[in-house]
Image (cartoon, rainbow, N blue to C red):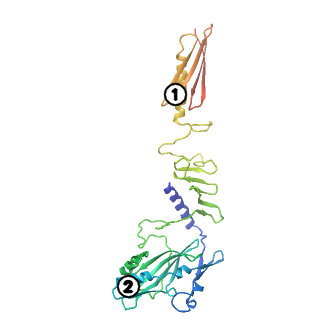
Amino acid sequence: MNQVKLFILSFFLVLILNSNSFADKYNFYFPDSSMDDNSDGIPNTSEQKVKIINTSTYSVYDGTLSGYYALEYSDLASTLTNSNAGSDYEASLDYMGSNQEVLDFAGSVLTLRENSVLQMNDNNGGDSFTYDRVTKVDVTTGAVASEILIASSQAAYDAAVGAGHTAMLAESNLNRSGAGYKTLTSFSPNITNSVSATSNVLSKGGFTTEQITNSDGTVIFREESDGTVHIGENSIVLADETVSASGNDEIYSSSGKLQLGNNSNHVTEIKGSLRVQDPKVETDAANRRYVDGIGASALASISSLTAIPEGNGVGLGTGFINGQSALAFGARNILENGLSLNFSSAYNSTVGSYTMTTGVGFSF
């Protein structure tokens, strides 16, 4: 069922990304060098904020980055000092010259990458280490949700991990520290994501949403609090076995009526078993149990009449087919002029009603 959800979500996502996009666009304004009075690379405490402008809705939000600018790395300095005899490492952060880049903005969480933001320098003249950093910060509180230090050498990576930081190694032999860089958003497979499949929409991460709406606000796709997935405003509902009332994967209509096909030329084929309930009205499909119940009733009716001896009398009969049984009562009356009348009534619990037969005969 999760694969069904993923297919449907991917389908609608492809439609959205290949049609007119209604994504919001943002401008982010961070502190600049004029707000760093002591020129230590960290803005003044009163200036540690970000101005966010939604250029699609024209709204403005003043966010705080207090926890982000308060990050310090004395633990990393101690690790490097202790692992390199005769060294004395000190951490410095340069937010002004770090080529700050916004990677994502979801809810109130801002994801930033800063190139060469953290320098670990040995006051005794040993090797220095430089780190890039990816940080997630909540702009409503200034709290840092997570950070990743990106090391440019194995030694820098080992030191970061040894100090308890989350780190990754991005080693490169090319020096482009003084050059500008260009950005690109691409959904194509390439050598950096190592994916051989071709797709209109490609992501090695996740796509998280509770609802997809059209430009007019009409709901295309949503997940309800009970775990069911709905397609459309008045919806087709998908419920997997973990949330369904039956314990099975379910597909049904929120309006109570679901149709397969929309004209008489459409054909619906079922591979495997199609199970239906016992019919209630004349247009309901009949299952095998119901048909076998009718057959058992017919056999019981015949048996009840053949069980009557010659002449007038009554008889009882039973019928049995594939687990379905029926009981019938029969009667026969022969009149003086050779005319005979017979009657039989049978009952099967699956059919849930009595069947009756009558007959007229004449002997000569």
Q: Nearer the viewer, mark 1 or mark 2?
A: 2
- Please state which amino acid type lies under the numbered disc 1: Ser
Say above or below: 60 vs 260.
Answer: below
On screen, residue 363 versus residue 149, left or right, reads right
Look at the image and tell me whether residue 169 can be seen: no
Q: Amino acid at mark 2?
A: Thr
Q: Is residue 300 visible?
A: yes
Viewport quadrant of the C terminus: top right
The location of residue 139, given as percent across then percent down, is 58, 76
Q: Position of residue 45 (x, y in %)?
A: 57, 85
Dot 1 surroundings within 10 Å: few (below 14), some, or many (20 or more)? many
- Up-down: is 126 above or below 165? below
Residue depicted at x 51% and y 25%: 319
**Callout count:** 2
At x 57% / y 65%, what residue is drawn? Answer: 16
Q: Residues within 10 Å of mark 2 (few under 14, many from 20)?
A: some
Residue 75 or 296: which is nearer the viewer?
Answer: 75
- Give the vertical position of 27 relative to 239 (above or below): below
Closer-to-camera residue (170/12): 170
Per the image, label 1 sits on a secondary structure element best described as strand
Q: Position of residue 309 (x, y in %)?
A: 53, 12
Instruction: Pick out the residue farthest to the top.
Output: 336
The residue where tag 1 is placed is 325
Residue 153 point in image, percent of width and height: 37, 81
The residue sitting at 44% across, 70% down in the picture is: 189
Q: Residue furthest left?
A: 85
Q: Tell me how far mark 1 sits from mark 2, CA to CA.
A: 89 Å
The residue that disc 2 covers is 81
Say what secondary structure mark 2 lies in.
Answer: helix
- Badge 1 or badge 2: first in the primary sequence: 2
